[in-house]
Image: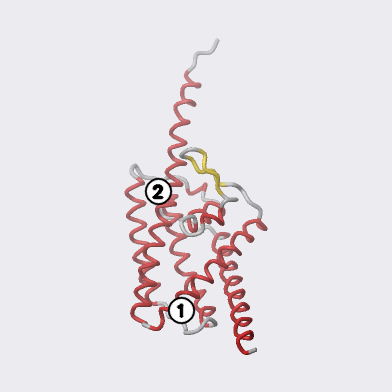
Amino acid sequence: MAEEIVKQDKKETLKKISEKASTLLFELITDIPGSLYTPIQNPDDKARLLAQRAAWKSATVSTSLSIPAGITGILTAIPDIAAIWKIQAQLVADIAASYGKLALLSREAMIWCLFRHSAAQLLRDIAVRTGSRIIVQKLSATAIKAILAKIGASISSKLLGKTLLRAIPAIGALGNGAYAFYDTLEVGKTAAAYFRALADQEKDEKPCDEQSTDEPTA
């Protein structure tokens, strides 16, 4: 009987964690951050530099996070973890701006860049790959919330696993920092690949436009 109560409490807590995470994510992708960066000649190098800076910042924040012991303690840490998502969202915006594509940073594109490396199976409704190009689909708010709910559930499971590291605090802190560093670098890689593809597509289409305007009129 006691075991069943513990399992039920665990299930309910995981549900609360999932709901809280998905709500914060929806707020995050609804308010797309701006950027102080402008388009540059070699955005690939800039994107790598921005990703490195953001990765170190995320690692520092993650290492300093204090997740209380026990599954219920994770609930109090979600807002702090959201701080890392904000760092990553700003990274995506800065990379988009460096490629001159900030205006094309939609909610769907933000979700793709933030979670493509860790939840690819959950994002099949967002993006379609055609050759080297990635076409991001426009989704309704309901569809976006459904996807974020699934991502929230995945995040809650991962956070639960991380509580096991608290048996050795130093290792737990270093492990969280290392994961945040890697995770942010992957966000940067995905964002760079996406906006590079958009920039290359524009370059491929430009000669055709110029050629059509140079044709003599009858």
Find residue 147 and report its horizontal and vertical position in percent: 60, 59
Find residue 141 and report its horizontal and vertical position in percent: 65, 57
Q: Residue at x 67, y 58 (%)?
A: 142
| Nearer-the-camera pick, 50 or 76 | 76
10 Å crowding of disc 2: few (<14), some (14-19), many (20+): many
Q: Which mark is residue 112?
A: none
Q: Which mark is residue 163?
A: 1
Q: How is the image coloured?
A: secondary structure
Q: Residue at x 51, y 50 (%)?
A: 105
| Nearer-the-camera pick, 58 or 115 | 115
Find residue 95 and report its horizontal and vertical position in percent: 41, 52
Q: Is residue 159 above or below residue 146?
A: below
Find residue 98 and report its horizontal and vertical position in percent: 40, 48
View extreme (top): residue: 218
The C terminus lies in quadrant: top right
Instruction: Kindly state the secondary structure of the residue where label 2 is placed.
Output: helix
Q: Residue at x 61, y 82 (%)?
A: 9
Amino acid type of the residue that numbered disc 2 sits on in the rendered structure = Ser
Q: Quadrant of residue 197?
A: top left
